[in-house]
Structures are given as structure tokens and as C-alpha cells.
Image: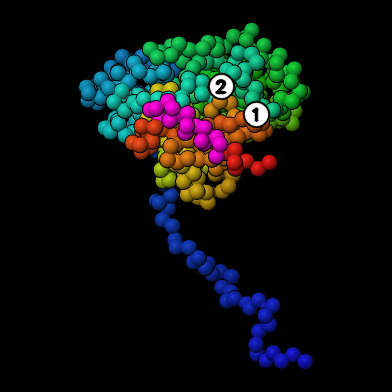
Amino acid sequence: MSTTPASAPSPHRVLPTARPDDDEIRPLKPPVDPTTLVHAQIRRDEFWRNIPAYADVSYEQFIDHAWQSKHTITRPEKLIETLKDHVSPEFLADVNAGFHKAPMSLRISPYILSLIDWREPYGDPLRIQFVPVASRLLPDHPKLGLDSLHEQADAPVPGLTHRYPDKALFLPLDTCPVYCRFCTRSYAVGVDTDEVEKVQLKAKPERWQRAFKYIASRPELEDIVVSGGDTYNLRAQQLLEIGETLLAMPNIRRIRFATKGPAVMPQKLLTDDAWVDALTRVVELGRKLHKDVVVHTHFNHPNEITGITHDGLNRLQERGIFVRNQSVLQRGVNDTVETMRLLIKRLGHVNVHPYYVYVHDLVQGVEDLRTTLDTALVLEKHIRGSTAGFNTPTFVVDAPGGGGKRDAHSFEHYDRDNGISVFTSPAVKEGQFYLYYDPLHLLSPEAQARWADPQEQYRIITNAIERAKGKIRP
């Protein structure tokens, strides 16, 4: 017979909680003022009129992709002429000197030029990405190379990189609507500069056919990234030709068209009907063949997203075209929790799914843009949970030397004092070690002195690899 008093609750019984009336809302969280939802506040003003050269440009002109292309600035002299009454002569001199030291040539659309806050140009996140200034440039890391990802070393034919078992990167052309300072393909993209003589990857049918022949001959290849350069710069017929050729191959299951265009010239999505129609036809053909065709784009800062962007992306949404985003982590651009959180929330708001945030590649001439690996680890921790998981990007390191993309947390060893991390990539190249280097100017003076000594460099690298070997599970 139980000795538990009748009034005592059973240890296994769940006591009922007070239930609100059916019409009552329990205030579990404090009310939210809609004006604080900054990610949804997308500007729709005529911002380009702030630039004297564009003061009389109408909305109809500004959203015309042909007008944008025609007025895109490709010479430092033209940029200086456009801005001469808007910024100080000292800043213009700094810009002119910056382009003479840059590995990437100049190409900037009126759209991006107009979004830069020229009242404070040194700190503006868009200026930082597209317009170099000599006074902010820093010496390259001693272990940095022009093609740090070894894309050419993994190319069986020019313009086709086959690194991953079932995926290849196809580069049909070497031009873009806008040139980014931080481009990891500055070895090929754009025209020659004072610093770099470019590898030629022109849009030539003969070269394309060699790439198609290789892809068709490799049954393990299922996934093709079509990049460049930028697929925005393909003519509609070329886009259609590439898409239909790849989809006709039985082995190909997925195509990704990579373009920064929506971030730097969204007008094309609104007014280049032929190009959008060609993309739509490839996507619809893929759907009929039960194959996946999507767009991968590249926004780095929430200021790049305007009402014009939203309207252009809505057009893709209406046609059932799925869009993912790949950002590059850059110092002074998106390396704070507040900015990165706003970026991913705003991307989600315009139906672009954040996919990757790359820790900045080891690119020549842009050491001022790089951050530490630790910055990425901190950012990922603080933004996870801000929004849905499928709209939360993975922070990755594209391992220098050809190891491919590695989760930023997956290093075998990270020496924060000396700014060196060691990754492995068993599925790509078994048994190799890949080293990523934090920028020297963010290390201590003692660490910088060690990297200046070749013998110390060797010791740092050897020690890091040995420590990594000790952590690898058999």
C-alpha cells in the first residue's frame, strides 16, 4: 500500500500550467517597433543625383542597363574627372596613385559609384572594395602568391579547374561588369595593369569546346560552376549555348551561374530582357530534365541592396530562379557582427540565400582588406541564430594551394600569435597540409619581426605542420 499522501503530486505527473484564454496573447517577448527592423528598410531614393555628373539623369535612364554599361568608368582619369568637384584634390591624388599600384584594373558602374558616401570616402565600405587608395595599401604577406588557390595548376584545359571529385569550375570569359579590388582571379580578370600581366581567358568557342569535351569525358563530373569573369557579361545566346550544352550531357546534374551583377548593376535584370529570358530558358530546361540550375551572386555589404536590386531580384523570383549568395569577409567592409547580421537579414528579405562567407583569399595588393581567421570564428558564433538556418552562411577558408573550401572551424591547428592555421582536405587531396596566413599588420610587432626572418618563417611553418600532424585522427 502506498504511503504517499493523497494530496502530494506523483513524481511522474506533469502539473498543468495556467492557460491563457483562447483570444489572449502571452507576451513572452517585448513588443518590437517596426522601425527597428532595419534590414527591411531598403532605400528607393534617387541617390545617384548626389553625384554632379549624374544630377540630371532620370530614373528611366538610370535603370537602363545599356546606359549603365555605356557610362561605366574604366580609366582612373575619367573617375577623377567625375569626382573632381565632389572630393578633395588630396583624395583624388591618393586614388590615382592607388591604381598604379593595384593588380586589378578599374571598372566601376554609375550605380556603385553613386552608392559610395563621398563625404567620407576613406571609410566607405563600397569605396574600399572597388577604389584603391595608395595611402591605405600594405605590403603583401611573404607567403602570398598571385594565383594562391592554384586554379591554373588544377586546370586540365585553359579556363576549366577540376579540383573536387564531382565538380568543375568553368571560366568562359575574363571580364566583369565591375572589377573588385579583392578578386581572387586578378591573374586573369581585366586588362593588364602596372603590376600584373594577365592570363588570357577570352570568350572563344574553340576554348569552350575543349572544356566541354573534357567535361563530357569525365562521368564523375555532375556539378559545373560557370563563372569567369562574370556570366553577366555573356551575351544571351552565349548563356543559352553554355547552358544547353551542359544540360545535354547525361553526367551533368547541376549548373551554377556565378555573377556579381545583381550587386553592382541590378538594372540588367530589369531591362536586358534577352539575357533574363535566356537564363530562364536554361533554368526551365533543367527543371524539365530534373536537373538543378541556379544563380550564385556576390553581395558583401547591405548598402549594395537598393530598391532597384529588390525589383530585379523579384523578377528572378517570379520566374522561379533560385539565388544564393557568397560573400567575402573584408576588413572595414563587413567584419563586424552588426554589419554581417544586417547583410544576411537583408539578403533573406530579398529572397537571396546566404551560402558562404569566405575568409579573404591571399590576393596580391589588397592586404589592407584581409582579416584574421579568428574574426570569422567570432562572427559565425554571434550571427548564428539571428535568422533561419538555411539563411545562415557557412564561414569557409578556400585553402591556399588547392585544398578547396574548408569550414573555418575545421583547422587542424591555429597559432593565433603567429597568424598561421593548418587545414587538411581528405576528400580533395589526401595527406596534404594547407596553410592560411593572417595579415601581418594585425599581429604583434614581435610576430611581424619573426615573419621578416626567412629562418623564423621556416620554423613557424614547420612547427605548425608538426602540431597539426599530432591532432589528426587515424
Give the residue type at disc 1.
Answer: Lys
Say whether residue 62 is left or right of residue 206. left
Give the residue type at disc 2.
Answer: His
Quadrant housing residue 116: top left
Q: Is residue 210 above or below residue 17?
A: above
Q: How far apart in space, not on screen, are marks 1 and 2 (Cα)? A: 13 Å
Confirm whether the magenta stretch covers residue 465. yes
The mark nearer the N terminus, 1 or 2, is: 2
Specify how the rendered protein is coloured: rainbow
* Residue 429, disc: 1
Q: Nearer the viewer, residue 35 or 216?
A: 216
| Residue at x 58%, y 26% (from the top left corner) | 402
Q: Is residue 160 above or below residue 350?
A: above
Q: Nearer the viewer, residue 58 or 209?
A: 209
Say whether residue 340 is left or right of residue 465. left
What are the residue bounds of the magenta stretch? 451-467
Q: Label 1: how many residues lie within 10 Å, few (<14), some (14-19) or many (20+)?
A: some
* Residue 150, disc: 2
The answer to whether residue 325 shows anywhere in this view is: no
Tag in front: 1 or 2: 1
Q: Is residue 138 above or below residue 44?
A: above
Q: Tell which residue pokes out farthest to the left in this image.
A: 89
Quadrant housing residue 23: bottom right
The answer to whether residue 385 shows anywhere in this view is: yes
